[in-house]
Image (cartoon, rainbow, N blue to C red):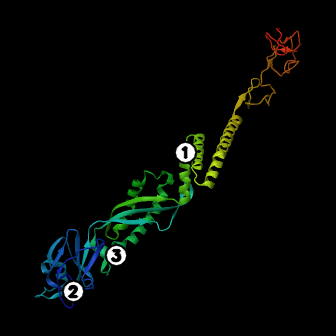
Amino acid sequence: MNKFDGGVFLENIEWFDESGEELVHRLPENGSGEIKYGAQLTVRESQAAVLFYKGKACDAFGPGRHTLKTMNLPILTKILSIPWRGDSPLRAEVYMVNLKYFTNLKWGTRNPVAFRDQELGLIRLRAHGIFNIQVVQPLLFINSLVGTMATMTTEGVETYLKRVIVSRFNDYLGEQLDTILNLPGKFDELSEDLQKRLTKDFAHFGLRLSQLYITSITPPDEVQKAIDDQSRMNAIKDMDKFMQMKAAMAMEKAASSQGESGAGMGMGMGLMLPGMFANAFQQNHNNRSGSTATSRTAECPDCSGQIPAEARFCPACGHQQVVISQCDNCGKNLSPNAKFCPQCGQKTGQQAGVSICGKCKAENLPQSMFCNQCGERL
């Protein structure tokens, strides 16, 4: 029997964890009981047993079947100083410790933690993950966490341990991560380094942190939306084609509207959308052309200064940029109908090689064969 009840001595001591969540179980459950001299203690491969007498740990037992006699209780025999006689009982308790791995324990931030991101500024993050533990020092675990409780489950230690994990995670994240935009591909590295930091914290309680995983690190919804929008913009190579596609999709949706009122609205939108998007395309094109034109410059052939490409005169020396005719003496560009060169004073006209029409007296460019006013052959 496994329990002490109404003065019956414990003769067979063993424990099965039906729930799969108990780390430690005390026998008898209601406190110190009378264990019969020569009682059988059965310990499974995944268990360890610790015998307590008068509040102190006396002997520990590994896997196997043990007979509780003087030869198997050297420490307790030394404490009692006298051997047991006959079937005298011993008031003591046995703590059965589960040594298996306890997996899929969850941890996460209860409240968002502040993080200064180099790209996004100050944001708040939530993080979640799982971890696995194992009891490797039964006596230390009993004395530090179990105490006098009859049982200890994963739920009893999970709350405290996940707070320890979150605390270490906050410090580690601030030291190692510059921006959450670099998170993809770093979860394994972050998990491994965080597990190393937590090794000593778990060892203080006789526990081993076998694995720790970070499953998610998420910013607030508004930050996620901003990141998604930026990703979409980077994915669009040609904004004009994208707008054309959206216009076509909108017109198709409007044309498929059902019902009398829906059909009228769909037809109206179908007529309006092409003009709306055409105006948008034209404005976008004008804006780009204007910005390109204002940014273009040219070199003045007279003073070599940089001037706007569309300028007709150099703002530094006054040199005319549009070539209509040039002075034969100095090569200066001449404005239309100029009688004298503004640079050397040479008279233009026949002296400058200008051809005068004999019929209408109009001036023509040098070496012209026909008059540009009346068409008469020069």
Place of residue 360 in the rendered image (x, y in percent of width and height, measured from the top left)? 89, 13
**Residue of label 3:** 145
State the quadrant of the C terminus: top right
Q: Nearer the viewer, residue 193 or 359?
A: 359
- Which element is circle 2 on? loop
Question: What type is the residue that disc 1 sits on?
Answer: Asn
Residue under pointer 1: 234
The residue depicted at 54 percent of the width and 58 percent of the height is 116
x, y percent for residue 79: 20, 83
Say whether disc 3 or disc 1 marks the residue closer to the N-terminus.
3
Element at label 1 = helix
What residue lies at 13% left-to-right and 86% top-to-bottom? 84
Question: Which x, y percent locates residue 350?
Answer: 86, 11
- Answer whether residue 143 is visible to the viewer in this image: no
Residue contact at pointers 3 and 1, CB within 8 angstroms: no
Hey, which quadrant is residue 25 in on the image?
bottom left
Q: Amino acid at mark 2?
A: Phe
Do the residues under discs 1 and 2 have CB atoms within 8 angstroms? no
The disc at residue 262 is none
Q: Are marks 2 and 3 in contact (CB under 8 Å)?
A: no
Give the distance between the C-alpha atoms of the residues marked 2 and 3, in whole angstroms: 25 Å
The residue that disc 2 covers is 4
